[in-house]
Image (tube, grey):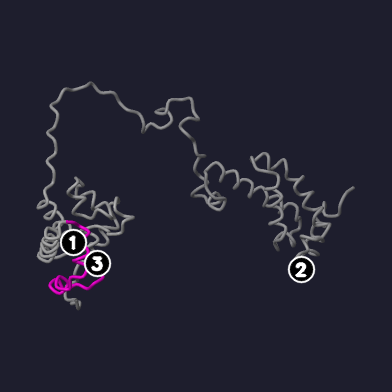
């Protein structure tokens, strides 16, 4: 038996009636239920072609049929079919790209090929990704380089001063800052105790003419974040420890957040802050 909604005119009539019937019409109307069963069967082959479940095609059709464009189109079924095809293509691309459907609809994502795993191809990896190719070289006997000399505490302080000076701090202010923190660190014997004592040290803030927020940030940068959850991170180590364990200054400059914090805490010429 042919239902009225199988024709474009009948579909338009049904969609308009469901629209004016108000909330719950799609859920309780018997003809709407029959329409969805028909729609799932109609787009089943198209859904399977795009490696999707038939219910996905029916869902896309349902979303399209609730729009004004379908209700007023000359051929509502044609508009629904185009919308279902576009949705199924996006679903298939999202599955291949391992991203959301919304991202798969955007050209900057959909232009890429599907995700491939190394184990999915029998070909040699260098043939797929030339960047992985390694050109063999003849072994050359050379003397092993001498072991790198460990960084001393004085060198770490000097490099920290250089780092602060390069990022906007006056060198004399940076020197005074590091000398003061270094002295308290030697007296306390540990970074946590030095950090706790310096955080409440109003004398240092008065001498350096910086406020409490800047002072707290500077202590976190130099001595590390006192939060136990950050203890084994670069932020938890602090600049001094990172230099002592072998990090180069260029590695610190690659840390965008560290560079930003040092630059933002630098004293501004002509600006005096009450300690």
First along the sequence among labels 1 and 3: 1
Residue 152 percent across, percent down from the top left: 11, 48
According to the image, label 3 marks what residue? 216
The nearer-to-camera label among 1 and 3 is: 1
The reply to whether discs 1 and 3 touch (Cβ–Cβ < 8 Å) is: no
**In this rendering, position of residue 263 left or right of residue 104:** left
Residue 4 percent across, percent down from the top left: 86, 54
**In this rendering, position of residue 93 left or right of residue 212:** right
According to the image, label 2 marks what residue? 22
10 Å neighbourhood of mark 3: few (<14), some, or many (≥20)? Answer: some
Q: Looking at the image, which residue is at 14% across and 73% down?
A: 203
**In this rendering, position of residue 180 left or right of residue 90:** left
Instruction: Reply yes or no: does residue 191 show up in magenta.
Output: yes
The magenta stretch is: 190-213
Marks 2 and 3, how far apart in space? Answer: 60 Å
According to the image, label 1 marks what residue? 194
Marks 1 and 2, how far apart in space? Answer: 69 Å
The nearer-to-camera label among 2 and 3 is: 3
Marks 1 and 3, how far apart in space? Answer: 12 Å
10 Å neighbourhood of mark 1: few (<14), some, or many (≥20)? Answer: many
Q: Secondary structure at mark 1?
A: helix
Q: Looking at the image, which residue is at 54% across and 50% down?
A: 100
10 Å neighbourhood of mark 2: few (<14), some, or many (≥20)? Answer: few
- Identify the main secondary structure in magenta: helix
Residue 223 percent across, percent down from the top left: 21, 58
Q: Secondary structure at mark 3?
A: helix
The residue lying toward the viewer, choosing from 250 and 113, is 250
First along the sequence among labels 2 and 3: 2
């Amino acid at each position: 038996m042919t239902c009225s909604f199988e024709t474009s005119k009948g579909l338009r009539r049904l969609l308009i009636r469901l629209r004016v019937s108000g909330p719950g019409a799609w859920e309780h109307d018997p003809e709407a239920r029959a329409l969805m069963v028909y729609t799932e069967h109609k787009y089943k082959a198209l859904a399977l072609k795009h490696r999707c479940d038939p219910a996905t095609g029916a869902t896309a059709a349902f979303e399209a049929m609730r729009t004004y464009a379908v209700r007023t189109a000359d051929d509502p079924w044609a508009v629904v079919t185009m919308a279902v095809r576009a949705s199924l293509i996006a679903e298939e691309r999202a599955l291949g790209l391992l991203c959301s459907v919304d991202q798969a609809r955007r050209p900057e994502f959909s232009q890429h090929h599907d995700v491939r795993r190394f184990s999915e191809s029998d070909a040699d990896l260098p043939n797929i990704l030339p960047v992985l190719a390694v050109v063999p070289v003849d072994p050359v006997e050379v003397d092993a380089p001498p072991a790198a000399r460990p960084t001393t505490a004085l060198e770490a302080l000097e490099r920290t001063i250089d780092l602060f000076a390069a990022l906007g701090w006056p060198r004399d202010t940076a020197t005074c800052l590091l000398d003061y923190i270094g002295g308290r660190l030697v007296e306390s014997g540990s970074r946590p105790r030095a950090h706790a004592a310096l955080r409440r040290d109003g004398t240092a803030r008065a001498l350096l003419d910086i406020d409490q927020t800047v002072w707290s940030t500077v202590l976190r940068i130099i001595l590390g974040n006192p939060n136990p959850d950050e203890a084994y991170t670069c932020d938890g180590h602090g600049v001094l420890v990172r230099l002592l364990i072998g990090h180069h200054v260029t590695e610190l400059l690659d840390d965008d957040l560290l560079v930003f914090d040092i630059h933002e805490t630098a004293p501004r010429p002509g600006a005096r802050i009450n300690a």
